[in-house]
Image (cartoon, helix red, strand yellow):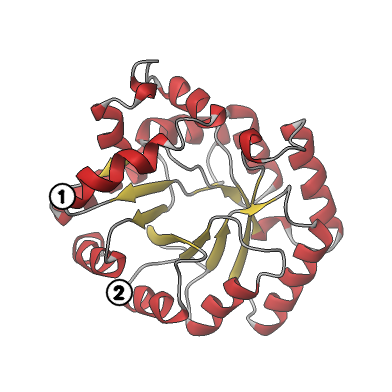
Amino acid sequence: MTFGKYGAWRRIGDWTPEDAAAVEDMGYGAIWAGGSPSADLEAVEALIAATSRVPVATGIVNMWRADPAEVARSYHRIEERHPGRFYLGLGIGHPEATAEYRNPYETMVEYLDRVEAEGVPSDRIILAALGPRALKLAATRTYGAHPYLTTPAHTKMAREVMGPGSFLAPEHKVVLDREEWERLARPNVERYLRLRNYRANLLREGWDQSDLEGSERLIEALVLTGHPAAVAAALSRHIGAGADHVCVQVLGQDPLAGYRALASFLF
């Protein structure tokens, strides 16, 4: 199953089955269920049932919140009902959000061991990864990596670390309307700038400490805005930097309208 070059990313609570079907009809190559879907994956399965051909992936199931045995049972249930349609995106989350957070790399390895022991194929798992060590783990143990809140500079680095052949699918935010961008972009990014894993990653990309205070240039890089043709061209820089697929997260009052407007220039 192919993901195509561009997919639609929304938080699981924002998706409806009808929206998923509409986005598939627009030509997007995958549906990404973001946030932290529950281990039963019932809401994710509803999106698969509403669509007919595109892969549906979680972005991501939080390893701290979801029991691996239950996640594996949910995977097998979905695979039996909808063969080949589901990819299990897993991630470690943020230390600020999890009191039990410890040994993130070892926890990822252990979780992968457990779901694979329950029969989830490694080539149907995608790992949230930012730093080189996690990216290498994604390349060697799973289908590939799903970085979040990055730019094409990170995509280039990730491809160099992962090497050829591993799936690389970064997320990127979009607000097409400039007035909406002025209202939404900064608060959306600044909540992530309080999390040390994203701060460390942005410093690795080449941003400086003043940017991490919420510089205009950083906000504009992380949340694209403008004419759909210009935004589509900016998204394509991830592909040029080595991504296989870009997970487009349209923000605003009417995300479906945004996806529709972009589709004319992406496909």
Residue 109 in the image: x percent, y percent? 78, 41
In the shown orientation, is residue 104 left or right of residue 13? right
The residue under label 2 is 26
Q: From the viewer's perspective, is residue 181 above or below residue 251?
A: above
Q: Which mark is residue 179?
A: 1
Instruction: Tell me if residue 233 can be seen.
Output: no
Tag 1: residue type? Glu
Instruction: Tell me if residue 163 can be seen.
Output: yes
Q: From the viewer's perspective, is residue 222 above or below residue 227?
A: above
Which residue: 44% across, 26% down? 202
Residue 79 in the image: x percent, y percent? 69, 76
Q: Secondary structure at mark 2?
A: helix
* Number of marks in the rendered image: 2
User: In terms of depth relative to the viewer, which is nearer, 250 or 131?
Assistant: 250
Residue 244 in the image: x percent, y percent? 44, 50
CA gap, disc 2 to disc 1? 25 Å
Residue 89 in the image: x percent, y percent? 61, 55
Tag 2: residue type? Met
In the shown orientation, is residue 44 left or right of residue 261? right
